[in-house]
């Protein structure tokens, strides 16, 4: 009989694969969203495809902390009881529900509210992860393994880069609004091009951080 630990490790690997692979699909679609030679209908189709692909990496980024913490607890690397783990899984399920509601209501008035809740939670999580990671590296608690504590810091950095990516592509919303109003020209094209340029550099950093997390998990160097 295969132990639960094995299935959790498998889930951890699969989530990483969806995270990195899905993000590349988003990156490819984004190149067509910003092309001024394409009609607006085509660009909106690529935007819809981008969002449909992106929900899988967003799902992975939500589930990974709970799965990772469960694994760390089973390894004895984190001091947290069964009640604490239950709270973590409950919060993770709520966060996942918020992420999916934000996706399903993307073109509805309520969508903005769900996105705001998601962003606010990410800010809270970043602060908590930074505190836990630094405390663990300095004092050996609440996480006893330095490589896991470092993964917490890298994950916090990933969340911050993800928030920056959202800010970077805000120009797309204004650009599509102006295209729908019949506006064209360099000023409108610049809204897409400038946002895409900033997002491209952030995406490369995002992938590098994901690879770093994978390397830490495989090598457990310290």
Image (spheres, grey):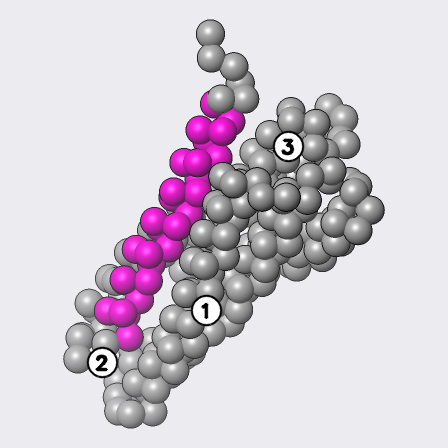
Can residue 87 be seen here? The reply is: no
Q: Position of residue 202 (x, y in %)?
A: 46, 69
CA distance separating discs 3 and 2: 48 Å
The quadrant holding residue 28 is: bottom left
- Between the C-alphas of marks 2 and 1, the distance is 22 Å
Per the rendering, the mark at residue 36 is 2
Q: Position of residue 22 (x, y in %)?
A: 35, 50
Q: Secondary structure at mark 1?
A: helix
Picture coordinates of residue 170, whole percent (x, y): 46, 74
Q: Which residues are magenta?
A: 7-34
Does dot 2 land on a helix, a strand or a loop? loop
Q: Residue at x 64, y 54 (%)?
A: 153
Q: Main secondary structure of the magenta part?
A: helix
Residue 23 lies in magenta, yes or no?
yes
Q: Residue furthest front?
A: 221
Instruction: Report the residue at 75% width, 54% height from top.
Output: 134
The residue to which callout 3 is attached is 72
Look at the picture and state if 162 lies above or below 11. Answer: below
- Judging from the image, what secondary structure is the residue with disc 3 in? helix
Whether residue 217 is visible: yes
Dot 3, crowdedness within 10 Å: few (<14), some or many (≥20)?
some
Q: Quadrant of the C terminus?
A: top right
Front in this rendered view, residue 34 or 146: 146
Query: Which dot marks residue 202?
Result: 1
In this rendering, the count of numbered labels is 3
In the depicted structure, whether residue 219 falls above or below residue 70 = below
Q: Nearer the viewer, mark 2 or mark 1?
A: 1
What is the C-alpha distance between the residues marked 1 and 3?
29 Å
């Amino acid at each position: 009989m295969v132990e639960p630990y094995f299935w959790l490790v498998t889930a951890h690997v699969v989530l990483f694969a969806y995270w990195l692979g899905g993000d590349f699909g988003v990156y490819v679609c984004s190149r067509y969203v910003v092309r001024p030679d394409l009609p607006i209908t085509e660009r909106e189709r690529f935007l819809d495809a981008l969002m449909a692909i992106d929900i899988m990496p967003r799902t992975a980024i939500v589930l990974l902390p709970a799965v990772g913490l469960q694994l760390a607890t089973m390894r004895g690397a984190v001091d947290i009881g069964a009640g604490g783990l239950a709270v973590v899984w409950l919060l993770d399920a709520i966060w996942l529900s918020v992420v999916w509601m934000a996706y399903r209501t993307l073109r509805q008035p309520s969508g903005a509210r769900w996105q705001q809740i998601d962003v606010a939670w990410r800010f809270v999580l970043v602060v908590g992860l930074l505190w836990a990671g630094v405390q663990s590296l300095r004092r050996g608690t609440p996480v006893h393994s330095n490589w896991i504590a470092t993964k917490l810091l890298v994950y916090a950095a990933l969340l911050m880069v993800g928030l920056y990516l959202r800010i970077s592509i805000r120009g797309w919303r204004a650009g599509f609004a102006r295209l729908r109003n019949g506006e064209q020209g360099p000023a409108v094209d610049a809204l897409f091009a400038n946002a895409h340029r900033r997002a491209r550099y952030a995406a490369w950093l995002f992938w590098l951080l994901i690879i770093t997390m994978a390397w830490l998990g495989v090598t457990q160097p310290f």
